[in-house]
Amino acid sequence: MGKKKNGNEFLVQGGILAAAGMISRIIGMIYRIPLLNIMGTTGQGFYEVAYQIYSIALILTSYSMPLAVSKLVSARLSKNQEKNAFRIFKSALLLTLVVSGVVSLIIFFGADVLAGGVMKMSMSAYALRVLAPGLVIVSVMGVLRGFFQGRGSMVPTAVSQILEQVVHAIVSIIGAYILLQYGKTVGSEQRDDLYGPAFSAAGATLGVIAGGLIALIFLVLIFYAYRGKLRNKIRRDKTVELESFGFIFKVLILTIAPVILSSTVYNIQNVIDSAMFSSIMSAQGFSEEHCADLLGSLGQYYTLFNVPLFMANALGSSIVPPLVRAYENGNREQVHQKIEMAMRVTMLIAVPSAVAFIVIPKPMLDLIWGSIDNTVAANLFRIGAISIIFYAASTLTNAVLQGVNKMMSPVKNAATSLVIHVVSLFIMLVFFHWSIYAVVASKVIFGLAMCILNSHDLREAVGYVQEKKRTFVYPAVAAVIMGVVVFVLQFVLALVISDAVATVISIVAGVCIYAVSLLAIGGLTEAEILALPKGAKIAAVLQKAHLLK
């Protein structure tokens, strides 16, 4: 964990962290499949509401701490100030323990008010109480991760992330199953069937605590293994002027405040959606069980919605770093080329994903959650799938705007879009009575507003105007061809073989048809294929198949 690293070592460290993040995301998406089969949509609804409150609390207490500690520790070490770097660590640890401890107590003792009074989902209080101690665990873990990252080592963070997610997945599934049985017993005694899914949701949240605790123990052991070297470094430090703890607290707060602000704006949308939905539906005479069941279907939507979004963003974002270098070098032409390429790569995944979710949503949902009635979730996709395109584009343009030093533009645009989203959601719920469908319909409006506002700011910042034919039209034409074939193929095959097998065959065929259609209409050039990850191998295969000129 030395303080001097060459460029290649930094790239390796960054690659390790990125790979760990991707593995954690994949595990996180996969374990939700059996979890929902255990909890059912009602339990999923209770889980979603509790986790949304927890997520906002997490942002306020610890989300930005690893970044802040890493940045401040690294800055001190660049001046060989080992003592001040360690004082940053101790100050951050004290600050996060106090803040997370207070918020954790508020959530634990105020769970009934938050779940029942604010979110109108009283049975979510059980899951919320289980989650409350997790704030302290994750906050301390964030400080340790930031400390190691500031010293140039991403390995402790990477390993702890994977370890945390694996334990989280296993304990969540086991906890949900065991407490479901217990909840059913309590429910039969209390004559209330909601105890089963409510206790199951609480069992699922045990994974958050267990995963975080195991990861924290791992990081503490690494820290103690390193403490001997750390003492020697501090002993050799000749720094005379030590920063006061008051000054460090001020710097920490000033560092984390902008991140907290932007993250809160981005993440509060789901909490507002759930609170508005439950409150308005309750006022309209619908039961808590009905609302929880619909929110559970919305949870299914979120789980699958994030898969293509994550893939599109991962591929698109890989082109952003060279964009930043081009901007710093003042090369506007290269900046425009990089933005266009990033957007094209993103749309190549987002557009066909949206079409697939529109044409065969129920067969795909039945394939994953066969024990659940997926009718509502399927309809949510038919309405909201188009927003995959908007969210993918807006997330990418957020990164681009930040890369060209327009840090507050995405925050301002997100806040404006959020106001539009809330107003449209209120109108759809109160006047049109669109129920849960109003949530995804208003999210389409949010995503579209973000795209329009970000595009305007990009044009103002670097003079960029998005090319449309090759970026949107070609992928859309190929995706429509794919969609028609997949719809017909799945319908015909389901008449002679099982629905699950028919769906798998249709999806595989759809991927091939989309690729061939895109190449046939000239929607993808060899140069663009070579720019993709493993592009040379892909191009070689396509040339052998005579699909690439």
Image (cartoon, rainbow, N blue to C red):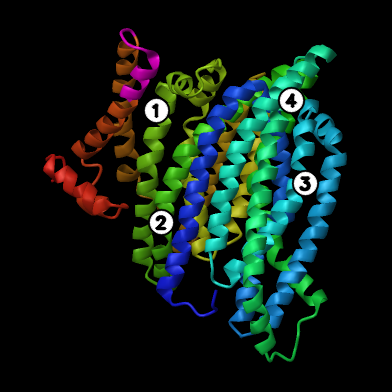
Residue 45's x, y, as percent? 67, 27
**Label 4: which secondary element:** helix
Q: Please tell me whether residue 217 is drawn above or below residue 451 in the rendered image.
A: below
The residue that mark 2 highlights is: 318
Q: Locate residue 77 relative to residue 133 in the image: left or right.
A: left
Tell me, for residue 133, which label it has, or none: 3
- Residue, disc 1: 356
Q: CA distance from mark 2 to mark 3?
A: 36 Å
Please name the residue shown 32% across and 11% down the image.
497
The earlier-in-sequence mark between 3 and 1 is: 3
Query: Which residue is depicted at the point 63% across and 57% down?
Result: 218
What is the quadrant of residue 199 in the picture?
top right
131 to 481, vertically: above or below: below
Query: Which label is found at residue 198?
Result: 4
Labelled pair 2, 1 in contact (Cβ < 8 Å): no
Give whichever of discs 2 and 1 has the lower sequence position: 2
- Cα separation between marks 4 and 2: 41 Å
Identify the amino acid type marked 4: Ala
Identify the magenta region.
495-506
Q: Check if residue 32 falls in the magenta segment.
A: no
> What is the C-alpha distance between the residues marked 4 and 3?
19 Å
Q: Image check: 343 left or right of 213?
A: left
Q: Is residue 66 visible?
A: no
- Residue located at (23% from left, 33% from top): 517
Mark 4 vs mark 2: give the one in front: 4
Residue 524 position by quadrant:
top left
> Residues under labels 3 and 1: Cα distance?
40 Å
Q: Which mark is residue 85?
A: none
Say which label, 4 or 3, has the lower sequence index: 3
